[in-house]
Image (cartoon, rainbow, N blue to C red):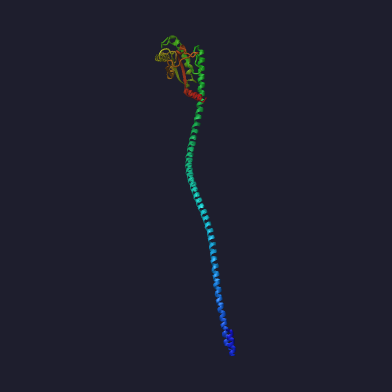
Amino acid sequence: MRKKYDSEYEDKESFSPWETYSDLYCGLLLVFVLLFFFAIYQYIAAKESNDADTLALQESMKAEQASVLALYKADLEDQQTAYQEKVNQLNSQQTALAIVRSDLEDKEAELEEKAELLTTQRSQIEAQETLLNEQEIVLNEQRELLDTQAVQLEQIIGIHGQLIEELNVELTANDIQVQADQKTGAIAFASKILFDVDSNELTGEGKEFFEKFLPVYLEVLLQSGFREYVAEIIVEGHTDDTGSYMHNLELSQKRAFSVAEYFLNDGCDFLESKQIEDLRSLITVNGCADKDPVYSSDGSIDAERSRRVEIKFRLRDREMIEEMDDILKQIE
């Protein structure tokens, strides 16, 4: 074509600038078209390549995302497992805490009960201390009273011994063949001297004996220094164990009464009226039957010595002395 053009150009032997420009523009247009189509080709190829790369990238990204998602899922499951374990642990701790709280409440209740009990016991202790203080005061008062009574008892005991000793001295000095018992002060008179067998009437010998004995006995017993301590003068009749109890009781009472009657009747002339008056205010007459026999050394009843009349005295507060003796025996 170029050659045809050249030949035509040469044939015509003419030159036109506008034609030259037209040809240039056509060439440029052609180049532009070619470049355009090349660019389109390049774009399509690049696009296809990019699409493939994009698809591969997307696939890679999807795989990576799946992997990451799997990791996240596994991590999430682990976290969920750990969370569930913590929840379970928390539940266990809450259960244990509830048990501890319940125990604490029980212990608080028990502590309150113990506090109330302690308060009650403290009140009781205070009451007991008050009572003990009161009892101590009473005990001190009783101790003082006991000390006073002890002094009095020692004095009474001393008087009891002095009285027995003086009785025996005076009886011996007046040649009266009886003696007061060193412990009891009792003086026993054999029935064979005072009465006939199974009789309650005083014999002449018995009357003579009491006429001699009684003034001496009362002179000692009723003298100043002893009289205020004498509470009672006792006449007791005793028998042996022969015969019935009622017979022996009646006989012992009658014999004791006969003795008392002899020196208490208005016709008594061997005692002073003051002595008789004092004696009437002090005397007690008892029949004891055979309840207090006298024993021989071999342990058998001595019938002759058991048949007797006793005269004895009782000092004031003698019962207290005997009670204290019993207490002392229990302490020992």
Viewer-side residue, 134 vs 244: 244
Q: How many marks?
A: 0
Viewer-side residue, 169 vs 34: 34
Indicate the position of residue 42 as horizontal and vertical percent values: 56, 73
Indicate the position of residue 302 as horizontal and vertical percent values: 47, 12
User: Residue 29's quadrant in the figure?
Assistant: bottom right
Indicate the position of residue 320 as horizontal and vertical percent values: 48, 24
Indicate the position of residue 256 as horizontal and vertical percent values: 42, 15
The residue drawn where x is 51% and y is 15% is 168
Compared with residue 193, is residue 126 higher up or lower down, i.e. above or below?
Answer: below
User: Residue 277's quadrant in the figure?
Assistant: top left
The residue drawn where x is 54% and y is 70% is 48
For the N terminus, give its image quadrant.
bottom right
User: Residue 52's quadrant in the figure?
Assistant: bottom right
